[in-house]
Amino acid sequence: MNFIFLSPHFPPNFYQFCVRLRQRGVNVFGLTDAPYHELRPELKEALTEYYWVNDMHDYDQLLRAGGYFTHRYGKIDRIDSHNEYWLETEARLRTDFNVFGLKTAEMDRIKRKSRMKQTFIKAGVEVARGQIVQTLSDGLAFIKEVGYPVIAKPDLGVGATNTYKINHQLELEQFFSQKPPVDYFMEEFVQGVICTFDGLTNHEGVPVFYTSHQYSQGIMEVVNNNDDVYYYSYRDIPADLEEAGRRTLKAFDVKERFFHFEFFRTPNNRLLALEVNMRPPGGLTLDMFNYANNFDIYGEWANVMVYNEFQAIYTRPYHCCHIGRKIHKHYQNSHEEVLTRYGGNIVYHNELPPLFRLAMGDYAYIVRSPSMSEILEMAKFIQQQK
């Protein structure tokens, strides 16, 4: 098998995908703009060959790299990065080299929030009301239907970037006076918590691993207010969430990919679909999969790629929780006090890469416990401010 991995050095934990592929006899080709000498030793050893480009946004350079690998090693079997940022680039390369996986023609339905909404509805999954708005008149007409507040976000965008909560007409007018020249999707505001359906499918689209997480608050609020966040995995997935997740998997035809689906759970227990992401959940969540289940998700993904098998048996023995802290905040309990009190539960702690910090925290603690009450106790202790 010949596998092109885009940007295998980032995020820092993703080098393990290449290592596990190589251990299973795969030719792994690194393609990125990072200087070779900056790669960690384990990644260098895992790469069959490394192709450096000076600009990952120059598609002609990427095309030449793919041509080089094909000429030297034969047909390319897979192309991936597991990174939202490169999703369209990967699809274009797969299309040009006729490689299995998502192609360019499929990007709109999995990237545009308006298209996602249509697919959710066809799948029988409840959604918040929303539509594309181009003008102030469009916005006023939509708000007449749903009322304030509303959320405005790029129809084609990643995460909470350039997302706004609009509470009254003055803010609406300000938004349209400054709106970038791109399609914006306006949605009714939903009060509730974010919960997810995450996992991995095999070649036929069967979920071979799945789990769910709940967030302490929305990422939009965390980013816009520079707040703290924590999120934890369930041990027992609510039945309605699993059903909605499985319907979504089928509707979006997710094959041989990680997935990260987001839903709102309202105070009256309605479950509303928010969006889909055809990649692993961000930050350290892949490692949280491992800590919650005592397996190796990087190796199991490689097993799916090479053998179309997920070989581990998992029972979710732990809740696993990411607890972030921001360096500008003053916390009641010091880092040393956190380690002293909960060292037996803390499976990892470190600074996060700068790209993740606004949403996930400057510093992260990954903790686990069979007990949900202990998880919440640790989150409160770590994030309590003076």
Image (tube, grey):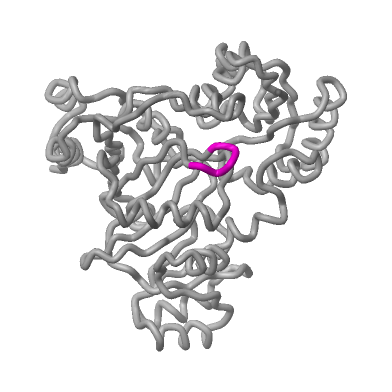
The one nearer the camera, 92 or 59, is: 92
Instruction: Place residue 187 in its image quadrant.
Output: bottom left
Residue at x-position 76% and y-position 30%: 76
The one nearer the camera, 16 or 51, is: 16
Q: In the picture provided, is 385 more to the left or to the right than 97? A: left
Span of residues in magenta: 202-206
Magenta span main SS: loop
Residue at x-position 19% and y-position 30%: 369
Q: In the picture provided, is 229 more to the left or to the right than 158? A: left
**Residue 222 visible in the shown view:** no
Residue 112 place in picture, x, y as percent: 58, 62
Q: Quadrant of the N terminus?
A: top right
Residue 266 place in picture, x, y as percent: 26, 64
Instruction: Place residue 282 in its image quadrant.
Output: top left
Residue 338 place in picture, x, y as percent: 17, 27
Q: Quadrant of the C terminus?
A: top left
**Residue 326 visible in the shown view:** yes
Q: Is residue 205 within the magenta segment?
A: yes
Residue at x-position 55% and y-position 16%: 40
**Placement of 129 over or under 365, stated as above or below:** below
Residue 32 place in picture, x, y as percent: 68, 30
The one nearer the camera, 21 or 248, is: 248
